[in-house]
Every structure is written in C-alpha cells, then in structure tokens.
C-alpha cells in the first residue's frame, strides 16, 4: 500500500510550491531517500533545477533533470511522467495523477490555496482513497 501525503500550503503560487518541494527533497535526501520531482513542463523542470541550488543559503541537493544522458543522482526532476528507476519519494507538482505508482514508496502532493489547485487535488485524493492507499493531510 502506498503512503500519500497531501501538503496544503498557506502561500499560493507556483514559486511557493517549488520552494516547498526543494525543502522536502532536501529533507528526504538527508534521510538517504531517493526522490523524483515531477513537474508540469520543461520550463518548470528548468526552474526547479536552478532553485534546488539556490532556495536557501548553503543548500546542497545533488540532482539532475532527466534527459538523454544517464546520470545517477539521489534527486531527479522530470516532466514526462516517467522517473526512470524506482524512487523512495515522488513529489508531484502537476495537476494529474502520477504514472507508475508502483515505482514509489511514498508520494507527496503539494496543494496551493487557490481553487483550481484544490479542485485538482481533491480528484487525486479521491482516486488514491478509492485505490486503498494510506493518506495523510498536513497543513503548512
């Protein structure tokens, strides 16, 4: 059974979601977990790639954007719906249900306070629940 955590953020906007994703990825990396961050587009992947180096002073999260080259990093970023190999944690920054659920031990869904984000997350919540996954909600 998959563990799904919904993080309901108090701050709106994509920048707030991406910064929280960086913090979550850093924490998971420090706990020796492998992480995949799924974004909605190539541009979002590029932004997150830069942000992982700069989101706070002294941050270090070894990562790479998935592409043609085969690199080994504890944190990967992608926008194509595939993470390559299995990962401990998927951080979902898209409005869709992730592909390959069995490739992950845990999924983090980041929810902005805007109505569109809430509506899409409610649909994903219902799907996870109907599939029998364990769900927790955290207000941040």
Image: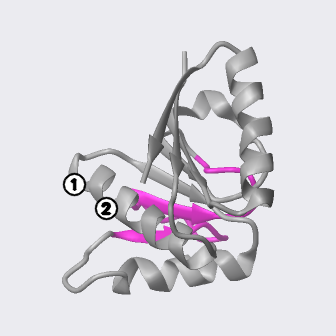
Magenta stretch encompasses residue 30 = no
Looking at the rendering, the stretch of residues picked out in magenta corresponds to 62-84
Counting from the top left corner in percent of width and height, residue 53 is at: 36, 83
| Residue under the point 69% across and 32% down | 125
- Which element carries disc 2, helix, strand or loop? helix
Say whether marks 1 and 2 touch (CB < 8 Å): yes
Residue at coordinates 22% horizontally, 86% vertically from top-left? 57
Q: Quadrant of residue 55?
A: bottom left
Answer whether residue 5 is visible to the viewer in this image.
yes
Residue 73 part of the magenta-drawn span: yes
Label 1: few (<14), some or many (≥20) within 10 Å? few
- Position of 108 relative to 53 (above/below): above
Q: Position of residue 92 (x, y in %)?
A: 61, 52
Secondary structure beneath disc 1? helix
Residue in view at x 71 percent, y 63 percent: 114
Q: Main secondary structure of the magenta part?
A: loop
> Toward the viewer: 121 or 73?
121
Residue bearing mark 2: 26
- In the rendered structure, the answer to whether residue 125 lies left or right of residue 134 reads right
Q: Residue at (72%, 51%) from the top-left corner?
A: 118
Q: Which residue is mark 1?
A: 30
Q: Residues within 10 Å of mark 2 (few under 14, many from 20)?
A: many
């Amino acid at each position: 059974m998959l563990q799904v955590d919904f993080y309901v953020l108090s701050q709106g906007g994509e920048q707030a979601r991406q910064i929280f994703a960086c913090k979550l990825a850093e924490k998971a990396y420090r706990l020796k977990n492998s992480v995949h961050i799924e974004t909605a587009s190539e541009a979002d992947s590029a932004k997150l790639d830069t942000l992982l180096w700069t989101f706070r002073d002294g941050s270090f999260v070894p990562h790479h954007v998935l592409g043609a080259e085969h690199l080994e990093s504890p944190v990967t970023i992608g926008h194509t719906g595939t993470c390559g190999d299995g990962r401990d944690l998927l951080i979902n920054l898209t409005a869709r249900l992730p592909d390959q659920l069995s490739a992950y031990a845990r999924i983090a869904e980041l929810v902005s306070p805007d109505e569109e984000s809430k509506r899409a997350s409610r649909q994903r919540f219902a799907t996870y629940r109907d599939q029998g996954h364990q769900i927790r909600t955290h207000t941040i």
